[in-house]
Image (tube, coloured by chain):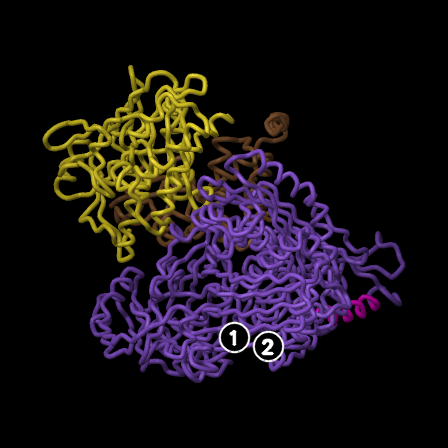
Chain colours: A brown, B purple, C yellow
Amino acid sequence: MRLRFILNGKPMEVDTHSGRRLLDLLREDLGLIGVKEGCGEGECGACTVLVNGKPRLSCLTAAIQVEGKEILTVEGLWENGKLHPIQKAFVETAGVQCGFCTPGFIMATYALLSENPDPSPSEVREWLAGNLCRCTGYAQIIEAVLLAAKYMRGDALRVTRAEKTS
Amino acid sequence: MEELKVAEETRVVGQAVPRLDAEAKVKGEARYADDLAFPGMLYGKAIRSPVPHARIKRLDLSKVAAHPGVACVVSPADIPGENVVPVIYRDMPLLAAEVVRYVGEPVALLAAETREAAYRAAELAEVEYEELPAVFDPLEAVKSDAPQVAVPEAAETGNVFNHMVIRKGDVARGFAEADEIVEGEYRVGYQEHVYIEPQGVIAVPEAGGMAIYGTLQCPFYVQNAVAAVLGLPLSKVRVVQTATGGGFGGKEDVPSQLAAMAAVLAWKSRRPVKVVYDREEDIATTSKRHPAVIRYRTGAKRDGRLVAVEVEFYYNAGAYQTLSSAVLWRGLIHAAGPYRIPNVKVDGYSVATNTVPCGAFRGFGSPQVIFAHESQMDELAVRLGMDPLELRERNALRVGDRTATDQLLEESVGLMDAIERARELSGWERLRREAEEFNRREPFRRRGIGVSTVMYGVGMGAKAPLLDKAGAYVKVEADGSVTVAVGNTEMGQGALTVLAQIAAEALGVRVEDVQLAPVDTSRVPDSGPTVASRTTTVAGAAVLDAARKIRARIEAAAREVLGADAVEIADSKVWPAGGDSGRAVPLSEVTRWMWVHNWDMGATGWAQGAPVDWDPETGLGKAYFVYAYACHIAEVEVDLLTGEAKVRRFWAVHDSGKIVNPALARGQVAGGVAQGIGYTLMEYLPSLEGRIEGTLMTYRIPTAPDMPEELVIDFVEAPYSDGPYGAKGIGEVPLMASHAAVANAISHAVGARLTEYPALPERVFALARNKTHPR
Amino acid sequence: MKKTGPVEIVKPKDLGEAIAFVRKGGMPLAGGTDAFVRIRKGFWDPPFLVYIGELPELREVEIREGGAEVGAAVTHAELLRSEVPRRLPIFRLVLEKLGAPAIREMGTIGGNVANASPAGDTLIPLYLLEARVNLVGPDGERSLAIEEFVLGPGKTALREGELIVSFWIPFPEGDPVPYFHKVGRRRALYIAVLSLGALLWLEGDVIREMRLALGAVAPTVVRPREVEAKLRGRRLSHEDLEPLCAELSAATSSITDIRGPDWYRREAAGRLLLGLLRLREA
């Protein structure tokens, strides 16, 4: 089929099979290797991308399901070498170890902070339940998300967060 | 909390510098095995045995070969070299030629133009099996009438691959002196690594030989295996590590098998061949932590002093030796725990069964016996009416004590400090009291507090001292930046960054000026495996050795450039000794001068572990050159209605000597705690007649909400004089300590002893309803 | 989606075309969270799939007099964000425990019900609220009670060519207190080993009216109506509930599978009744 969609802000048109996995389409046909396959059945979250701003597992998504939609991958977050605040936060808190799950976590974090710019630690924990990490024990990932939230809000909202935790 | 007192003399070592590889990883640019492609690349796949034990009557690959897209098939006769995956022994064939010994054993290979064609073609192989009696349980397999699984040359007797012992003192006399004796049998099942990146390699024919790219821990193992199956000299095989998405021991020996498969296919097809497992194939056919049956007897005096321990344990090794003899040995040495015990008798057996070969997994044979010895300590505490932490303090090893193998501990024993710090951080007495109050108040919930103390022998130890070595090559560039090549790998643990910090410290440069080259076996001598928590200590010492040689030359050059008798170097700046560092010149001026004057700007470094010496007859001797220690405390809540358990809070204190990078060390601890929580509570991989069918949907590892809401990590540093800047190892220790603290907390909560992992809800439910001893 | 290659998927332009495709043997595809996993494993091998996930007729959530109408292709996340959990808080308790955010954005209520898994989370509130399933097929429309629709594991009353269009979820009288406990081997992202959902109409601590639904303890979700009847008039106390635990266990017909043994499901199901006492803490 002829498939049209927006990929990382750019209109895209490709010939593909209706049932091609979005994961394969992105990785193998379009070279976006930041999308990772960890299990192929929606259990690890390493293949998480955003479709119309919502998190989706690209291993359980067929090409036909993204027709006309906007897709964002980890490659779409940084520009000219400048890291997105979420990426910066993951570097700074050592929220990255082997790094294979990292793009999925970053995309899940992006979705969380779009919906909830000021999450509590337990909201972060619950939100990230769909992304498996075997290296970090999640502690420094959760710190990264909270730091990223702070970066993205600026300091203006610090008061509300203090209220929330008390 | 994790802030460390950084010794005056270090500027880079001891700092939480960001990982050197983090930026590429957060951008999605790091290239893992499946992210690489080569022109003309094929996809390789194994055809595997569906039965656990059988004679192969007929192997017909004609339909496979005829399938569209199939470029190449390989049967055992097509292997140009030896049909073997060499690990410690040489009993495991690459392809079973006559007999298959486990479900999933490869019998043939194919390579196709696409992944899809490879999957389809693999189903077309015609293999006729004559089934043989099979055995799956190690206690059955040691019986005289059990089917013979082990290749006889690789086994001591029958299916016993190895039997190892410790005989220290006289346990009969020890038990006779004991006021209290506890006994128990403990069982654990498999633990699967679940590195998030599955296994994968690519073999690329190159210059009359073969290059291998892959996700792996031990490039020199892979080099050796590929040379063996291709019948090539080692110099014709080059192994390059790709970014590696987790290892935990699972990428120690298994990549040799994948690489040998890919190499044989590439050799025959003369094209690059990629072999990447999907998760199902990975779980079903790769190594895991050994299931075990462990029997203990521990005796103590009324005041808590341990007088005797007697241990017998059986590890289910699977069908081939792979790493089991080494795993068994580590279990043996660690069986008595970090305690002073005059009389010790240990018998460890690794047993062949018709199951997938087990191998290395973080802790390497020690977590199983730690579950047992730490359970015994808590049983003893109950029997003696003594606080479990106090019982450990009474017996904890200190400098000047002798271990279970009669090794004198001359330095660097931080166990007591770790226990004291854990006691203080957790508020142990209050914690136990609050749990008891909670339990009196709550009808259907129980809280328990558990502790675990461990020791860990750093490095390969006396069973394989020949592997405890590492090389390094360090060169300073004309612009003052530094390139470091090592043979030990980054798999997520942070080795790359830690080694760069050591190089930067020794050279006096900024860490961001140091670049670690991708690991490539052609760059440095065989540096042994990246295992056994030894990279910081041994590879770090090799880097230090090389860097010090360069440093001496830089200083000599700087004396010329500055016209000074002595110089100081730091932060990539140089100034006359005792002079004003504000008037320093950039290091690049000195390195430029060296370059102009044709100085040798590179140096090799070499290190080996300090001498060890151990007697297999008695099991006594200096087993390891140094030990790391830890004390973990867990608070668990159990729902009595359902048996569900949750870890609420956790405290982990480690002595790993000097901590080179506190942020990375903290990450190692938190990750190990998570794997330990998984091991105790949920990670369950049943095997039915040797068949393992697992996916991440059925094999559950901890998610973020499974982690304790409060996780406190701290370090006490008992420096090791032979380690770089006093560092010992850390990688494996957190997992080893964490699981038993959780197990002890569950037993404390429900008032009955947990004797089997994992503590699934149904097991805890049953345990809580049929209490076995008074609280 | 199969390991041996992609599966053909068609995207109908309206409901009529969808029914025609399904009649030709196509298997409906909504979110794909279950279908693609089963196809990959080879459990299902449909000739082609009919992607109904974006049909407008299946995508609406409408609050009406006396109840809510929820389209079959409404995702769990959309349902969570809708007005429904505010009116029917049991949905919030259940949906927040279903999978994880990405799974909830993909999976649909219709897909969850059509799978007819005894562990299907959304079935718990649908059984408790006595929802109806609205179907359309070659012979027109019909509506079935949820308990008539689900027949057994993977079995439903769907006829050839029929599709689920929506669910009618009546608002219960008054303001029942919701309860949900989903038992699993970890804290998140799991399929229920067993689950208990309940709606309680309380007067003080006396149970005036009560509905219970047990998941994953029988071929379908179970409403133990005899236990419900016996609970009426009892107090929300240990003494009053304890005697009925065994009866609740008896209402199950559990099996042993990869997620848990039968004896445990049976016994824990009974004990879970005491979990209702935790409502007093709230």
Chain bearing mark 1: B
Nearest the eye: B731 or B135: B135
Relative depth, front residue between A95 and B410: B410
Is residue A21 placed above or below A126 in the rendered structure? below
SS under mark 2: loop
Tell me the residue at 43%/30% (across/down).
Answer: C276
Residue C183 in percent (x, y) is at 41, 41
Q: Which image quarter: residue C28?
A: top left
Q: Quadrant of the N terminus of chain B?
A: top right
Q: Which residue is mark 1?
A: B325
Asked whether the residues under the numbered discs 1 and 2 touch, taking CB atoms below 8 Å apart as contact, a structural biologist would say yes
Q: Which residue lies under the disc numbered 2?
A: B463
Q: Chain of mark 2?
A: B
How far apart in space, not on screen, are marks 1 and 2 (Cα)? 9 Å
- Assess whether residue A70 is covered by the magenta stretch: no
**Residue at point 54%, 42% (across, down):** B637
Disc 2 crowd rating (10 Å Cα; few below 14, some 14-19, many 20+) is some
* Magenta span includes B559: yes
* Nearest to the observer: residue B132 or residue C261: C261
Give the residues in magenta: B547-560
